[in-house]
Structures are given as structure tokens and as C-alpha cells.
Image (cartoon, helix red, strand yellow):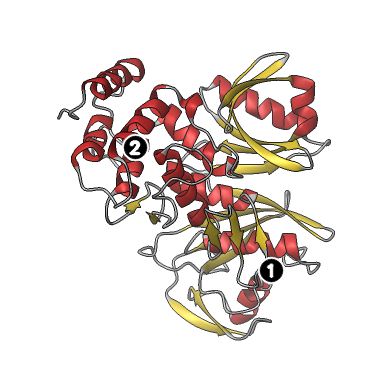
Amino acid sequence: MQIGDAALEEDLRELERRYNAAGRRDLAGHADVRAHVAAIASGLLAPGLDRRELLHGVLRELLDPGAVAQSTWNTCAATTVQLWLALREPAEYARLVAGLASPRGAVPLAGGPWLQRHQQAVRPDASGRSASARLLQASFMDFANGDDSYSNAEDLSTRDRGRSYSGLYPDQFDVLIESVTARHWDTLEVGKGNSADAVELIRRATTRGEHVPVSIRKDRMMHRLLVHRSERDFMHGLDPVGRRVRIRMDDFTERLGFVSLPGGTPSDAPSLFVTAGESEAWVRVNTLLPTLPDFCPGCAQPATTRLDVPHPAGRLSVPACAGCNKSALGGLLSAFFVSGPTPGIVAVRRASAVPPMLELAARHPKWLTQLWRLNRGSERNYLEKW
């Protein structure tokens, strides 16, 4: 199908030649990049969107991912995921933009639930971003922050109690990149004690052809980058502000804050390194589709019944197998506490003693966000030593 504009058609052919995108389908397996660009060119759009501007932005960003930019907005985490898509999955990039630009403004994510268009992302804002970047970044931000509300106009997320913050926390970034890419990612917090190991992991990943999101300390804040190549003395990457960067290795190692690494196999689950008081533990989290059965917290086997278990949050109705008892389940569930019943957590179990690892199975990524927030924002140790 043609898109009806000679200049844009030539850009599309160049994209197909350069990235071998012709015939390569999106992550949902539905269509190739041409079909999705054609949908933007000929389909109905949400009122307020300029069709030519949208097409130009999509093709420019896919032809030159360095053009993807957050501008002056604090959306570096969302923009890093946008960059990853532009570099690796052009058909998926176009599919998401087409879905967000449609009158319905919703599109299913390859690895998660639906992505909804942010209501403030249709018309131009003060950022000067392209229409496609504005749609993706605002919608990504509002998706990743869970129950919080994102304002594109103010570039802030607000919690129920009125506290506002900018950007995304590491756990929120994990929720976003896993849902968008349909891959498992491990996020590691980096300090002086493990910075050399983290750099080596980045080297190995980029050698395999991966693009690795990292957080760099910058002016008392964290800034996301997408690393695509490592050398002995330099790390090379794409900065979401819209430029390519080369950072000296000693400076990169010193400023590295977080690194997100793709899981090796589909069975790998995402991990968070949680620090609460004096307790440190890896938490490996599985996010389940609602259609899957509940799992027993005691043994992680499919549940055959439900038990009422006393818990500091109140009496919980917990999925269970025939062999695990209330006492064992109550002790395991005490390692996770969220001030109320937790129907989103369907399994909690001790996965290993060395290193200490607790495995959770969750219904929806928002429960992972809640876990991170509790351990970051409270003096109480919600992950008890075991």
C-alpha cells in the first residue's frame, strides 16, 4: 500500500532498505512497518493531530533514531524505551504510534496490557517534540507510573496524597520496558562495590548486539542513556535529549547508577534489588496474565483451593495447594506487606537462601511499583530477613 506522498514514500523505501524492515512484522506479529505507516497515512486520526507532521516524525525517527528526543521534558526513561524501539523494532514503533493516534487512542502492548493515549498529548506543547514522540512519551509515562497521574503539561506525576515527582523510578522503568518489548529485564543498582562488574555486564550485552539502558548520575539526579557499543576507553550511546554520546570509561564507571539488562531466556523473570533498613535481598518477580491460574505462595504450584490466612494487613484469602498450611503461608506472606489485602500478589515464596531471594508472582505491574515504593519511602522493613 502506498502512503500518498512522494517524499514520505521515498523515506519509507529507504527505511525498508536500510534496516531490512520490509516484511518484518511487529512484536504482535500482525503487520510490517509499511502497513502501520499506511494506517497513519490513510486511517482516521484523533482530532487535533496533523497527519503529515505525524508521518514525518515517525519516518524521521526510524531513519535516524538519534532524532528521538525528550527535549526539555523529564521523560528520559520513556524516551529511552522509545529509542530502543526505533533502533530495533521499527514495525512495532509504527504500530504503537498508529494505535495511539487513532480515534480510540489505545493499542495492546506486546508484553502487557493496553497502552492508552494521554489526553494532553494530542496537541503541540511547549516541549517542541514531534507528534510521535509526544504521543509515545506521555503515554509511556502515564502507563509506567501505575496508579499515579501524569500531567504532560507540567511534566509531573502526582500520587493520591498530592506528592508530585518527575521522571520514572527504576521499578517503573522495568514495568514499561518489559511491557513494551515483551522481554524480561533485570535492573541492577550500581555502587562502588559492583561498578566494575556492572560495566562488564554491559560490555557482554553490547557485544551480543544488545542495546542497554543505563542511568547516569547527573547534577544530583539520574539521567537515562541507551548504550549500544563499548570500547576499552569509551562507552557509546544515545542520549534521549537527541544526541549521540561518547563517555570516557572512568567517568562512566564513576557515574553509573542503574543498568537494565535483558534476560537471557524467556523463562527469566525481572529482578529488583531492594534495600530496606539493614536488609538487602533480590526480589524476582513474575507478572502473570489474568488468565493463568493462581499459585500457592508456599510451593509455587498451581493452587487447588483458597485459605483465609491471618496477616498484619488483615485476613487474606490466599490461593493454596492441598499440602501447604495456614501457618506456612502466613509466614511467607509476612515478607510482603502493603497496608491492605493484596489480591494482586498471587504467590510469595522463598526462592533461595544464598543469595537471599524472595519470588513473587503478581497480577499486574502496579504491584511491583508498590513494592518498590514501600521499600524506598518507609523506614519499616517490608522485606524481612529470612
Q: CA distance from mark 2 to mark 1?
A: 48 Å
Left/right of residue 385 with respect to residue 108 in the rendered view: right
Q: Secondary structure at mark 1?
A: loop
x and y percentages locating residue 87 in the rendered image: 45, 27
Q: Residue at x 48, y 73 (%)?
A: 321
Crowd rating for badge 1 (residues with CA inside 10 Å; few <14, some 14–19, many 20+): some
Q: Give the amino acid type for the residue marked by disc 1 in the picture.
A: Ala
The residue closer to the viewer here, 208 or 140, is: 140
Q: Is residue 165 above or below residue 20?
A: below
Q: Earlier in the sequence, mark 2 or mark 1?
A: 2
The picture places residue 242, in percent across and down from the top left corner, at 55, 28
Q: Local crowd at mark 2 within 10 Å, few (<14), some, or many (≥20)?
A: many
- Residue 10 in the image: state x and y as whole percent: 26, 18
Q: State the residue position of label 2.
A: 54
In the displayed structure, 201 sits above or below 336; it is above
Which residue is rendered at x = 65% and y = 29% of the image? 201
The residue at the point 23 percent across, 26 percent down is: 23
In the rendered view, tell whether residue 49 sits above or below residue 291: above
Q: Is residue 302 above or below residue 235?
A: below
| Residue that badge 1 annotates | 335
Residue type, label 2: Leu
Query: In the picture provided, is 91 more to the left or to the right than 127?
Result: left
Whether residue 324 sits left or right of residue 108 in the image: it is right
Residue 263 in sight from this viewpoint: no
Could you tell me if the residues under marks 2 and 1 are in contact, i.e. CB atoms within 8 Å? no
How many numbered badges does the structure rendering display? 2
Looking at the rendered image, the quarter that the C terminus falls into is bottom right
Q: Residue at x 48, y 49 (%)?
A: 138
- Judged by depth in the image, the label closer to the viewer, 2 or 1, is 2
